[in-house]
Amino acid sequence: MGCQYFDPCSGGADSFTVAMPKLTFGRGTLAETGARAADLGIKRIALFTDPQLEDGALVATVTESLKRASIEVLVFSDIRIEPDDDTIMRAAKFLADTNTDGAISVGGGSVMDTTKAALMIDAHGGHIREYFAPPIGDGKAIPGPLAPHIACSTTSGTGSECTSISVIRVNELNTKFVVAHPHLLPTAAIVDPQCCDSLPANVVASTGFDLLSHALECYTARAYTRLSAVADPTARQLIQGANPFSDLAAREALDIAGKYLARGVADSTDNEARDNLMWGATLAGIAFGNSGTHLPHAMSYGVTHLMSNITSDGYPVASPFVPHGISVIVCAPSIFRYTAEGAPDRHLEAANYLGSDSVGATPDDAGEILSTRLIELMRATHMPNGLGGIGFSAADVKALTESSSRQKRAIANAPRDSNLVDMENMYSGAISYW
Ligand SMILES: [Fe+2]
């Protein structure tokens, strides 16, 4: 397979591993959670959610289903958007204090990522900081499996229900870092599109660009054949570069984003569009969960680190706050102009899946065609006009670069190498698009 995949090189990996939870998708499937938990042998479950969802219909449906299956439910809802290291340690203590034998998360990426990390600490001890890669942490490996986790996503963006990744803000450093390990993968994922029926348009837009960028980044990521082969098969990470399996899911997710993102944002009653976006988010999660993201996500961390004096409608958090999907997409057109040189055919194909017209285009046109299509979609969904639209200027470029350059794993997953000057140029190109 390796020699047939694009961009092989000597000494590179010639195999890849695929992992995903047992996935259930469809309207009404939140009511299946009790039967799913009972099937996993869970008798006393920790239900993780956030304060906005805790007293709502979605959590009520899950709780009733669990109780119908004679499962005792203990709720932890003290989870902020973009959970921090303190949140994780409090959630882990909750697990230890309540002596549960499994967990269910009902929420967006913040809730699901908190649950993964809390289960990890509960099973294997230590502090969350020890599990971050150096130089932030000790790079502690997760030595074994966690308690069963049923992940129920309530937004059409994160895809966290299908990934082995947990993103956590480190308060002391005021930025986010990633813990990634196959043992973090939820046992089961339940994706019920009814969760998105009442989402405000701007939340559908920002989460939709998260899904779009997940798919785009893994489709254009460095090929797995260019990453080093591993001697120990259990040490093979799922962040392993683009591969034939992640391609499958990414292509479909890109097609869905191109067709339905603008529709799902424009009309909250367009169930066809919103259900497809939910499916696209799950597919994109499956894709990047088995390949990894690259520069748009890496460079979004500098944005959320340094944002100031900005709030976003529809999100119950104090200023400064920029939704994750917006922090990713504001730089993406500029970044893909740069990365196209590393994998022009893939950038051109991705633009086509997103619906751009590239008849007669050559590989040299790939970056421009893809970024033009992204900008079209951003304008159609009222996204901010680049970094300038969320309060940044050329004076911030150096600091943004310095902050994001710490995301070494994602930067290395890009199809084209970049140094600090290249990153500064990408940020400069992202200040304004129209
Ligand atoms: Fe993301």
Image: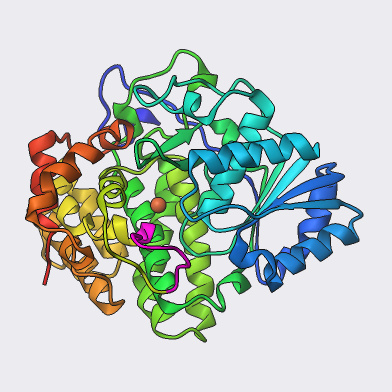
Give residue 367's quadrant in the image. Answer: bottom left
* Position above or below: 313 against 135: below
| Residue displayed at 26% across by 36% down | 411
Note whether 59 is above or below 23 in the view shown.
below
Residue at figure coordinates x 76%, y 41% from the top left? 102
Numbered marks: total? 0
User: In the rendered structure, which segment of residues is drawn in magenta?
Assistant: 314-325
Q: Is residue 15 left or right of residue 394?
A: right
- The answer to whether one can see residue 164 in this image is no
Q: Quadrant of residue 134?
A: top left
Confirm whether the magenta stretch covers residue 170: no
Q: Quadrant of residue 107?
A: bottom right
Closest to the observer, 125 or 357: 125
Residue 7, image x, y percentages: 25, 33
**Closer-to-camera residue (337/111):** 111
Residue in the picture at 33% in, 59% down: 320
